[in-house]
Image (spheres, rainbow, N blue to C red):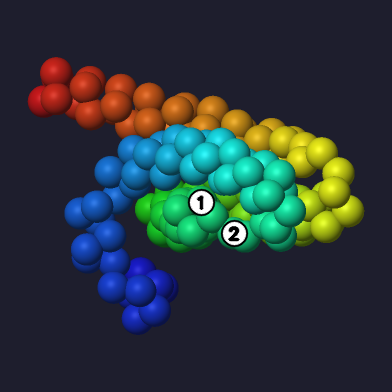
Amino acid sequence: MDPLQFLVPLDWLAVVGPALPFAILVMALANVATRHRAHSKHVEQAADGDSVDRYFPHVFTTVGLVLVSFLFTLVQPTGGAIISVVAATVLLADVFEFEARNVEARNELEIERPKSSIAASSIVVIYAIYYSLVALDATFWSGLFA
């Protein structure tokens, strides 16, 4: 008996489990793209003299990345825990970087790039690429020798 069977129905997770590394990779790449667009929007808003607002697609991809990495923890506990910690770091860095952009806009300073968020999200992308290649390699070899 699986100890989590009463907490989370694991039957559906066993079906989508092999696709989770690819979902994490897609969410991580989308997060990088929306981070770039959010920074452009923040620079535009600060140039207009407004306060910066959160960019909803970026918030969606960040929260989605964290949730998908938590699901991956149920499939592969060690790898999922590692990528979940880094994804949560991205979320935390985004919160602090957004507040820093608010301070810069309020004081009419130059809006800087979110350096810590970029560093954390690049680690997530590298780790997601690693897990996707491992999953792709496993399906290739198992299909070849089955």
In the rendered structure, find residue 105 and report the number of the disc placed on it: none
What residue occupies the far bottom of the structure in this picture?
Answer: 6
**Given the image, on which type of amino acid does mark 2 rest?**
Arg
Q: Residue at x 77, y 37 (%)?
A: 112
Report which residue position mark 2 lands on. Answer: 54
Q: Position of residue 86 (x, y in %)?
A: 63, 46
* Mark 2 secondary-structure assignment: loop
Q: Nearer the viewer, residue 13 or 29?
A: 29
Using the image as rendered, state which of residue 125 and residue 82 is in the foreground.
125
Q: Name the residue tied to disc 1.
A: 58
The answer for how far apart the CA atoms under marks 2 and 1 are is 8 Å
State the image quarter where residue 25 is shown.
top left
27 with respect to 107 (left or right):
left
Q: How many numbered discs sit on the rendered protein?
A: 2
In the displayed structure, would residue 33 be above or below residue 71?
above
Query: In the image, is residue 95 above or below residue 132?
Result: below
Q: Is residue 8 above or below residue 80?
A: below
Callout 2 touching callout 1 (CB < 8 Å): yes
Q: What secondary structure is found at the residue carrying circle 1?
A: helix
x%, y% of residue 146?
Answer: 11, 25
Residue at (33, 32) in percent of width and height: 135
Can residue 100 be seen here? The reply is no
Q: Is 100 left or right of 14, judged from the image as shown? A: right
- Image quadrant for the N terminus? bottom left
**Residue 57 location in percent, x, y?**
45, 53
**Kind of residue sitting beneath label 1:** His
Above or below for 39 versus 48? above
The nearer-to-camera label among 2 and 1 is 2
Can residue 3 be seen in this snapshot? yes
- Residue 96, given in percent of the width and then of the height, sits at 76, 56
At a point 29% along the width and 66% down the height, the residue shown is 10
- Farthest left residue in view: 146
